[in-house]
Image (cartoon, coloured by chain):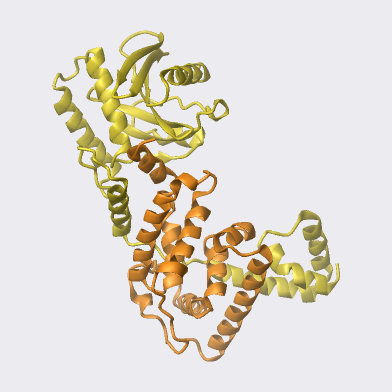
Amino acid sequence: MDAGERLALFEAAVLPHLGSAYNLARWLTGNAHDAEDLVQDSMVRAFAYFDGFRGDDGRAWLLAIVRNSFYTSLRRRRRAATDALPDDLLLADVRPDPEVALLRKVEVDALRVAVERLPESFREALVLREIEGLSYREIAEVARIPIGTVMSRLARGRALVRRALTESAKGGAT
Amino acid sequence: MSCDEVRAAVAVYLDGELDPPTSLALEWHLRACDACAGIVAQERALRGAFADGGLRFEPPATLDARVRSALVARAGSAGARRSIPSWLGIAAAFVIGVAVMAAVSSIGRTPLGVSRLRAEIVAGHLRSLQGRHLTDVLSSNQHTVRPWFAGKLPFSPTVPDLAAEGFPLVGGRLDVLDGRAAAALVYNRRLHVINVFTRPADSGDSSERSLGSDAGYHVVAWTRAGMAFWAVSDVDPAELERFARFFDSAAR
Protein backbone atom coordinates (compact mmCIF):
# COMPACT_ATOMS: atom_id res chain seq x y z
CA MET A 1 0.00 0.00 0.00
CA ASP A 2 1.49 3.31 -0.97
CA ALA A 3 1.74 6.42 1.12
CA GLY A 4 -1.25 8.03 -0.59
CA GLU A 5 -3.58 5.16 0.23
CA ARG A 6 -2.24 4.95 3.74
CA LEU A 7 -2.97 8.62 4.23
CA ALA A 8 -6.45 8.24 2.78
CA LEU A 9 -7.26 5.36 5.12
CA PHE A 10 -5.83 7.28 8.05
CA GLU A 11 -7.97 10.27 7.15
CA ALA A 12 -11.03 8.03 7.09
CA ALA A 13 -10.33 6.06 10.26
CA VAL A 14 -8.50 8.39 12.62
CA LEU A 15 -8.76 12.02 11.54
CA PRO A 16 -12.49 12.26 12.33
CA HIS A 17 -11.54 11.99 16.00
CA LEU A 18 -9.63 15.25 15.91
CA GLY A 19 -12.25 16.87 18.14
CA SER A 20 -11.89 14.25 20.88
CA ALA A 21 -8.11 14.44 20.62
CA TYR A 22 -8.23 18.21 21.01
CA ASN A 23 -10.63 18.05 23.95
CA LEU A 24 -8.40 15.62 25.85
CA ALA A 25 -5.29 17.57 24.90
CA ARG A 26 -6.91 20.78 26.12
CA TRP A 27 -7.79 19.24 29.47
CA LEU A 28 -4.33 17.75 29.86
CA THR A 29 -2.29 20.81 28.88
CA GLY A 30 -4.56 23.46 30.37
CA ASN A 31 -4.36 25.88 27.45
CA ALA A 32 -5.30 26.07 23.78
CA HIS A 33 -1.86 26.71 22.33
CA ASP A 34 -0.19 23.67 23.89
CA ALA A 35 -3.26 21.61 23.11
CA GLU A 36 -2.94 22.36 19.39
CA ASP A 37 0.73 21.46 19.41
CA LEU A 38 -0.01 18.24 21.28
CA VAL A 39 -2.74 17.27 18.82
CA GLN A 40 -0.55 17.89 15.79
CA ASP A 41 2.31 15.99 17.39
CA SER A 42 0.01 13.11 18.26
CA MET A 43 -1.57 12.92 14.82
CA VAL A 44 1.81 12.69 13.13
CA ARG A 45 2.86 10.05 15.63
CA ALA A 46 -0.39 8.17 15.11
CA PHE A 47 0.16 8.20 11.36
CA ALA A 48 3.61 6.71 11.87
CA TYR A 49 2.10 3.99 14.06
CA PHE A 50 -0.86 3.41 11.75
CA ASP A 51 0.32 0.00 10.59
CA GLY A 52 -0.13 -1.18 14.16
CA PHE A 53 -3.75 -0.07 14.24
CA ARG A 54 -6.08 -3.04 14.13
CA GLY A 55 -9.14 -1.20 12.93
CA ASP A 56 -11.56 -1.31 15.80
CA ASP A 57 -11.88 1.97 17.61
CA GLY A 58 -9.86 4.80 16.10
CA ARG A 59 -10.86 7.14 18.87
CA ALA A 60 -9.58 5.16 21.86
CA TRP A 61 -6.40 4.33 19.92
CA LEU A 62 -5.80 7.98 19.10
CA LEU A 63 -6.58 9.19 22.63
CA ALA A 64 -4.02 6.73 24.02
CA ILE A 65 -1.42 8.28 21.74
CA VAL A 66 -2.44 11.81 22.76
CA ARG A 67 -2.13 10.91 26.43
CA ASN A 68 1.15 9.16 25.92
CA SER A 69 2.58 12.03 23.91
CA PHE A 70 1.56 14.44 26.62
CA TYR A 71 3.28 12.56 29.38
CA THR A 72 6.48 11.73 27.56
CA SER A 73 7.38 14.57 25.25
CA LEU A 74 5.54 17.79 25.89
CA ARG A 75 6.41 20.34 28.50
CA ARG A 76 3.72 20.25 31.13
CA ARG A 77 2.40 23.42 32.56
CA ARG A 78 1.26 22.96 36.08
CA ARG A 79 -1.57 25.16 37.12
CA ALA A 80 -1.00 26.49 40.58
CA ALA A 81 -3.86 25.70 42.93
CA THR A 82 -4.00 29.38 43.80
CA ASP A 83 -4.98 30.39 40.26
CA ALA A 84 -8.33 32.07 40.06
CA LEU A 85 -10.50 31.46 37.02
CA PRO A 86 -8.23 30.26 34.23
CA ASP A 87 -7.78 32.90 31.54
CA ASP A 88 -8.72 30.31 28.94
CA LEU A 89 -12.33 30.79 29.87
CA LEU A 90 -12.15 33.86 27.67
CA LEU A 91 -10.58 32.12 24.70
CA ALA A 92 -12.36 31.08 21.53
CA ASP A 93 -12.13 27.37 22.13
CA VAL A 94 -14.63 27.50 24.96
CA ARG A 95 -17.87 26.70 23.19
CA PRO A 96 -20.32 29.54 23.68
CA ASP A 97 -23.74 28.46 24.80
CA PRO A 98 -26.12 31.42 24.71
CA GLU A 99 -29.01 29.35 25.99
CA VAL A 100 -27.34 28.73 29.31
CA ALA A 101 -28.92 31.00 31.88
CA LEU A 102 -26.55 33.22 33.80
CA LEU A 103 -26.92 31.23 36.99
CA ARG A 104 -26.16 27.97 35.22
CA LYS A 105 -23.20 29.55 33.54
CA VAL A 106 -21.76 30.30 36.94
CA GLU A 107 -22.25 26.68 37.88
CA VAL A 108 -20.65 25.47 34.64
CA ASP A 109 -17.67 27.73 35.28
CA ALA A 110 -17.35 26.41 38.83
CA LEU A 111 -17.43 22.87 37.52
CA ARG A 112 -14.80 23.62 34.91
CA VAL A 113 -12.52 25.18 37.50
CA ALA A 114 -13.05 22.23 39.82
CA VAL A 115 -12.01 19.79 37.11
CA GLU A 116 -9.05 21.90 36.04
CA ARG A 117 -7.72 21.83 39.57
CA LEU A 118 -7.87 18.08 39.91
CA PRO A 119 -4.65 16.12 39.98
CA GLU A 120 -3.87 14.99 36.43
CA SER A 121 -4.70 11.33 36.85
CA PHE A 122 -8.15 12.08 38.27
CA ARG A 123 -8.81 14.82 35.72
CA GLU A 124 -7.88 12.60 32.82
CA ALA A 125 -10.13 9.77 34.02
CA LEU A 126 -13.08 12.13 34.54
CA VAL A 127 -12.66 13.82 31.16
CA LEU A 128 -12.50 10.48 29.36
CA ARG A 129 -15.55 9.20 31.21
CA GLU A 130 -17.81 12.24 31.44
CA ILE A 131 -16.92 14.18 28.31
CA GLU A 132 -15.69 11.54 25.90
CA GLY A 133 -18.03 8.86 27.22
CA LEU A 134 -15.44 6.08 27.19
CA SER A 135 -16.15 2.85 29.01
CA TYR A 136 -14.03 1.71 31.97
CA ARG A 137 -12.27 -0.73 29.69
CA GLU A 138 -11.52 1.95 27.10
CA ILE A 139 -10.21 4.33 29.77
CA ALA A 140 -8.03 1.52 31.09
CA GLU A 141 -6.68 1.03 27.57
CA VAL A 142 -6.04 4.74 26.96
CA ALA A 143 -4.41 5.35 30.35
CA ARG A 144 -2.71 1.95 30.56
CA ILE A 145 -4.02 1.20 34.03
CA PRO A 146 -6.12 -1.62 35.46
CA ILE A 147 -9.89 -1.17 35.47
CA GLY A 148 -9.87 -1.09 39.27
CA THR A 149 -7.60 1.94 39.12
CA VAL A 150 -9.97 3.60 36.65
CA MET A 151 -12.82 3.15 39.10
CA SER A 152 -10.90 4.47 42.06
CA ARG A 153 -9.62 7.52 40.16
CA LEU A 154 -13.14 8.30 39.04
CA ALA A 155 -14.47 7.94 42.55
CA ARG A 156 -11.79 10.17 44.06
CA GLY A 157 -12.01 12.70 41.25
CA ARG A 158 -15.78 12.95 41.64
CA ALA A 159 -15.46 13.31 45.39
CA LEU A 160 -13.01 16.19 44.98
CA VAL A 161 -15.22 17.88 42.40
CA ARG A 162 -18.27 17.54 44.60
CA ARG A 163 -16.40 19.05 47.51
CA ALA A 164 -15.09 21.93 45.38
CA LEU A 165 -18.60 22.68 44.12
CA THR A 166 -20.01 22.64 47.63
CA GLU A 167 -17.34 25.03 48.82
CA SER A 168 -17.76 27.37 45.89
CA ALA A 169 -21.53 27.40 46.41
CA LYS A 170 -21.02 28.31 50.06
CA GLY A 171 -18.54 31.01 49.15
CA GLY A 172 -21.17 32.70 46.97
CA ALA A 173 -19.75 31.21 43.73
CA THR A 174 -17.44 33.35 41.55
CA MET B 1 -28.73 -5.86 48.65
CA SER B 2 -27.75 -3.96 51.77
CA CYS B 3 -27.39 -0.20 51.84
CA ASP B 4 -23.61 -0.51 52.09
CA GLU B 5 -23.50 -2.75 49.04
CA VAL B 6 -25.73 -0.37 47.14
CA ARG B 7 -23.64 2.67 47.95
CA ALA B 8 -20.50 0.87 46.87
CA ALA B 9 -22.15 0.02 43.55
CA VAL B 10 -23.89 3.32 42.75
CA ALA B 11 -21.08 4.87 40.71
CA VAL B 12 -20.57 1.74 38.65
CA TYR B 13 -24.33 1.48 38.12
CA LEU B 14 -24.68 5.07 36.92
CA ASP B 15 -21.70 4.62 34.62
CA GLY B 16 -23.60 1.79 32.97
CA GLU B 17 -20.95 -0.73 33.93
CA LEU B 18 -22.87 -2.80 36.47
CA ASP B 19 -23.97 -6.27 35.42
CA PRO B 20 -27.73 -6.69 34.84
CA PRO B 21 -28.55 -8.95 37.83
CA THR B 22 -26.85 -6.60 40.29
CA SER B 23 -28.40 -3.57 38.60
CA LEU B 24 -31.81 -5.12 39.06
CA ALA B 25 -31.13 -5.85 42.73
CA LEU B 26 -29.95 -2.29 43.19
CA GLU B 27 -33.09 -0.84 41.60
CA TRP B 28 -35.26 -3.00 43.81
CA HIS B 29 -33.44 -1.70 46.87
CA LEU B 30 -33.93 1.92 45.78
CA ARG B 31 -37.67 1.48 45.57
CA ALA B 32 -37.84 0.82 49.28
CA CYS B 33 -34.95 2.91 50.57
CA ASP B 34 -35.20 6.70 50.51
CA ALA B 35 -31.74 7.24 51.93
CA CYS B 36 -30.04 5.32 49.15
CA ALA B 37 -32.36 6.84 46.56
CA GLY B 38 -31.22 10.26 47.75
CA ILE B 39 -27.59 9.35 47.28
CA VAL B 40 -28.27 8.07 43.79
CA ALA B 41 -30.04 11.34 42.98
CA GLN B 42 -27.01 13.33 44.14
CA GLU B 43 -24.65 11.24 42.04
CA ARG B 44 -26.98 11.62 39.08
CA ALA B 45 -27.02 15.38 39.55
CA LEU B 46 -23.24 15.50 39.37
CA ARG B 47 -23.23 13.52 36.15
CA GLY B 48 -25.96 15.77 34.84
CA ALA B 49 -23.74 18.78 35.50
CA PHE B 50 -21.02 17.23 33.38
CA ALA B 51 -23.44 16.26 30.65
CA ASP B 52 -24.90 19.75 30.39
CA GLY B 53 -22.00 20.62 28.21
CA GLY B 54 -19.82 23.67 28.28
CA LEU B 55 -17.00 21.40 29.40
CA ARG B 56 -16.07 20.12 25.99
CA PHE B 57 -13.42 22.17 24.27
CA GLU B 58 -13.79 22.53 20.52
CA PRO B 59 -10.71 22.83 18.34
CA PRO B 60 -10.17 26.04 16.40
CA ALA B 61 -11.20 25.78 12.75
CA THR B 62 -7.58 26.08 11.63
CA LEU B 63 -6.38 22.97 13.44
CA ASP B 64 -7.83 20.53 10.93
CA ALA B 65 -6.01 22.14 8.01
CA ARG B 66 -2.83 22.41 10.02
CA VAL B 67 -2.91 18.70 10.91
CA ARG B 68 -3.68 17.69 7.33
CA SER B 69 -0.68 19.66 6.07
CA ALA B 70 1.56 17.97 8.60
CA LEU B 71 0.25 14.54 7.58
CA VAL B 72 0.65 15.19 3.88
CA ALA B 73 4.18 16.37 4.46
CA ARG B 74 4.86 13.24 6.49
CA ALA B 75 3.30 11.00 3.84
CA GLY B 76 5.74 12.55 1.41
CA SER B 77 2.94 12.96 -1.02
CA ALA B 78 4.49 13.72 -4.39
CA GLY B 79 1.15 14.14 -6.08
CA ALA B 80 1.19 16.79 -8.73
CA ARG B 81 -2.43 17.71 -8.14
CA ARG B 82 -3.03 20.57 -5.80
CA SER B 83 -5.01 19.42 -2.80
CA ILE B 84 -8.33 21.10 -2.22
CA PRO B 85 -8.32 22.80 1.20
CA SER B 86 -10.78 21.25 3.58
CA TRP B 87 -12.31 24.60 4.40
CA LEU B 88 -13.87 24.65 0.96
CA GLY B 89 -17.42 23.43 1.24
CA ILE B 90 -18.44 20.23 -0.46
CA ALA B 91 -20.38 22.24 -3.04
CA ALA B 92 -17.42 24.46 -3.86
CA ALA B 93 -15.10 21.50 -4.25
CA PHE B 94 -17.69 19.88 -6.46
CA VAL B 95 -17.88 22.95 -8.71
CA ILE B 96 -14.10 23.07 -8.99
CA GLY B 97 -14.10 19.38 -9.80
CA VAL B 98 -16.57 19.89 -12.65
CA ALA B 99 -14.52 22.76 -14.05
CA VAL B 100 -11.31 20.74 -13.90
CA MET B 101 -12.86 17.72 -15.54
CA ALA B 102 -14.54 19.81 -18.22
CA ALA B 103 -11.18 21.36 -19.04
CA VAL B 104 -9.49 17.98 -19.09
CA SER B 105 -12.05 16.20 -21.23
CA SER B 106 -12.66 19.19 -23.49
CA ILE B 107 -15.19 17.27 -25.51
CA GLY B 108 -18.26 18.43 -23.61
CA ARG B 109 -20.83 15.66 -23.38
CA THR B 110 -19.42 13.38 -26.07
CA PRO B 111 -18.51 10.09 -24.35
CA LEU B 112 -14.80 9.47 -23.97
CA GLY B 113 -13.05 6.57 -25.66
CA VAL B 114 -12.24 3.57 -23.45
CA SER B 115 -8.63 4.43 -22.76
CA ARG B 116 -9.43 8.06 -22.00
CA LEU B 117 -12.30 6.96 -19.76
CA ARG B 118 -10.05 4.53 -17.93
CA ALA B 119 -7.42 7.23 -17.52
CA GLU B 120 -10.01 9.59 -16.11
CA ILE B 121 -11.31 6.96 -13.69
CA VAL B 122 -7.81 6.10 -12.47
CA ALA B 123 -7.06 9.81 -12.11
CA GLY B 124 -10.26 10.25 -10.10
CA HIS B 125 -9.27 7.32 -7.89
CA LEU B 126 -5.80 8.78 -7.27
CA ARG B 127 -7.20 12.22 -6.66
CA SER B 128 -9.44 10.79 -3.97
CA LEU B 129 -6.41 9.32 -2.24
CA GLN B 130 -4.10 12.29 -2.37
CA GLY B 131 -5.05 15.54 -0.72
CA ARG B 132 -8.76 15.54 -1.51
CA HIS B 133 -11.11 13.85 0.91
CA LEU B 134 -11.66 10.19 0.29
CA THR B 135 -15.19 10.49 1.63
CA ASP B 136 -17.79 13.22 2.13
CA VAL B 137 -19.87 10.84 4.20
CA LEU B 138 -17.91 8.41 6.33
CA SER B 139 -19.91 5.38 7.41
CA SER B 140 -19.85 1.63 7.00
CA ASN B 141 -23.64 1.60 7.11
CA GLN B 142 -25.36 1.53 3.72
CA HIS B 143 -28.45 3.04 5.34
CA THR B 144 -26.41 6.12 6.22
CA VAL B 145 -24.45 6.46 2.99
CA ARG B 146 -27.25 6.01 0.46
CA PRO B 147 -29.61 8.68 1.87
CA TRP B 148 -26.73 11.12 2.21
CA PHE B 149 -26.76 11.59 -1.56
CA ALA B 150 -30.43 12.70 -1.60
CA GLY B 151 -30.70 16.30 -2.71
CA LYS B 152 -27.08 16.34 -3.80
CA LEU B 153 -27.46 14.17 -6.88
CA PRO B 154 -30.39 13.72 -9.27
CA PHE B 155 -30.25 9.96 -8.69
CA SER B 156 -30.00 7.60 -5.75
CA PRO B 157 -27.01 5.26 -5.97
CA THR B 158 -27.27 1.66 -4.81
CA VAL B 159 -24.93 1.02 -1.90
CA PRO B 160 -24.70 -2.70 -1.19
CA ASP B 161 -23.26 -4.05 2.06
CA LEU B 162 -20.41 -6.36 1.09
CA ALA B 163 -18.73 -6.70 4.47
CA ALA B 164 -19.55 -10.40 4.65
CA GLU B 165 -17.72 -10.92 1.36
CA GLY B 166 -14.67 -9.12 2.72
CA PHE B 167 -15.27 -5.69 1.20
CA PRO B 168 -16.42 -3.36 3.97
CA LEU B 169 -17.98 -0.05 3.06
CA VAL B 170 -15.98 3.04 4.02
CA GLY B 171 -18.30 5.80 2.82
CA GLY B 172 -19.24 7.91 -0.16
CA ARG B 173 -18.54 11.20 -1.85
CA LEU B 174 -19.64 13.40 -4.70
CA ASP B 175 -17.45 13.19 -7.77
CA VAL B 176 -17.38 13.95 -11.46
CA LEU B 177 -16.99 11.63 -14.44
CA ASP B 178 -16.88 12.71 -18.05
CA GLY B 179 -18.16 16.12 -17.04
CA ARG B 180 -21.20 14.69 -15.28
CA ALA B 181 -22.05 14.37 -11.61
CA ALA B 182 -21.37 10.93 -10.18
CA ALA B 183 -21.45 9.21 -6.83
CA ALA B 184 -18.28 7.56 -5.61
CA LEU B 185 -18.73 4.68 -3.19
CA VAL B 186 -15.66 3.70 -1.24
CA TYR B 187 -14.92 0.16 -0.13
CA ASN B 188 -11.92 -1.52 1.48
CA ARG B 189 -10.27 -4.77 0.56
CA ARG B 190 -7.80 -5.46 3.38
CA LEU B 191 -5.83 -2.19 3.23
CA HIS B 192 -6.64 -1.34 -0.37
CA VAL B 193 -9.19 1.25 -1.40
CA ILE B 194 -11.80 0.49 -4.05
CA ASN B 195 -13.73 3.37 -5.58
CA VAL B 196 -17.00 2.62 -7.36
CA PHE B 197 -18.10 5.51 -9.56
CA THR B 198 -21.73 5.41 -10.56
CA ARG B 199 -24.18 7.56 -12.48
CA PRO B 200 -27.11 7.05 -14.87
CA ALA B 201 -26.14 4.96 -17.88
CA ASP B 202 -26.16 5.93 -21.53
CA SER B 203 -26.63 2.37 -22.70
CA GLY B 204 -28.45 -0.81 -21.75
CA ASP B 205 -27.45 -3.49 -19.25
CA SER B 206 -24.06 -5.12 -19.65
CA SER B 207 -22.19 -7.49 -17.42
CA GLU B 208 -18.81 -6.89 -15.82
CA ARG B 209 -16.02 -6.23 -18.27
CA SER B 210 -12.46 -5.15 -17.66
CA LEU B 211 -11.36 -1.80 -19.04
CA GLY B 212 -7.71 -2.66 -18.44
CA SER B 213 -5.19 -1.01 -16.15
CA ASP B 214 -3.26 2.23 -15.84
CA ALA B 215 -0.16 2.37 -13.64
CA GLY B 216 -1.25 -0.71 -11.72
CA TYR B 217 -4.82 0.46 -11.14
CA HIS B 218 -7.43 -1.81 -12.69
CA VAL B 219 -10.89 -0.74 -13.85
CA VAL B 220 -13.99 -2.91 -14.23
CA ALA B 221 -17.23 -1.55 -15.71
CA TRP B 222 -20.82 -2.73 -15.90
CA THR B 223 -24.32 -1.40 -16.37
CA ARG B 224 -27.43 -2.48 -14.52
CA ALA B 225 -30.99 -1.16 -14.44
CA GLY B 226 -30.14 2.18 -16.01
CA MET B 227 -27.07 2.83 -13.86
CA ALA B 228 -23.46 2.59 -14.97
CA PHE B 229 -20.70 1.48 -12.60
CA TRP B 230 -16.92 1.65 -12.73
CA ALA B 231 -14.86 0.00 -10.01
CA VAL B 232 -11.20 1.00 -9.71
CA SER B 233 -8.48 -0.22 -7.38
CA ASP B 234 -4.94 -1.53 -7.20
CA VAL B 235 -6.13 -4.89 -5.87
CA ASP B 236 -5.53 -7.91 -8.04
CA PRO B 237 -7.69 -7.66 -11.23
CA ALA B 238 -9.34 -11.00 -10.49
CA GLU B 239 -10.20 -9.73 -7.01
CA LEU B 240 -11.68 -6.54 -8.44
CA GLU B 241 -13.80 -8.56 -10.86
CA ARG B 242 -15.04 -10.70 -7.96
CA PHE B 243 -15.91 -7.51 -6.11
CA ALA B 244 -17.81 -6.22 -9.14
CA ARG B 245 -19.82 -9.43 -9.40
CA PHE B 246 -20.67 -9.32 -5.67
CA PHE B 247 -21.67 -5.67 -6.02
CA ASP B 248 -23.80 -6.34 -9.06
CA SER B 249 -25.67 -9.30 -7.59
CA ALA B 250 -26.17 -7.63 -4.21
CA ALA B 251 -27.60 -4.56 -5.88
CA ARG B 252 -30.17 -6.52 -7.86
- Near-viewer residue (B89 or B100): B100
The answer to which image quadrant residue A86 occupies is bottom left
Rendered location of residue A87, percent (x, y): 36, 80
Q: Residue B136, located in which quarter of the rendered image?
A: top left
Q: Which residue lies at the image location 52% right of the left edge and 20% below the top edge?
A: B250
Q: How many marks?
A: 0
Closer-to-camera residue (B145/A29): A29
Picture quarter with the N terminus of chain B: bottom right
Which chain has been coloured yellow in this picture? B
Q: Is residue A18 left or right of residue A64?
A: left
Q: Is residue A31 left or right of residue B79?
A: right
Task: Decide if residue B152 is in sight here.
Answer: no
Give the image location of residue B70, x and y in percent: 30, 53
Residue reaching furthest to the bottom:
A171
Chain identifier matching the orange colour in the rendered picture: A
Q: In this orientation, does residue B130 appear?
A: yes
Front in this rendered view, residue A47 or A22 = A47
Question: x%, y% of residue B252?
Answer: 50, 16
Quadrant housing residue B77: top left
Question: Which residue is painted at 49% across and 86% down in the image?
Answer: A173
Vertical position of residue B127 compared to residue B221: above or below: below
| x then y, percent, for residue B134 | 35, 38
Q: Residue at x 50, y 29 (%)?
A: B167
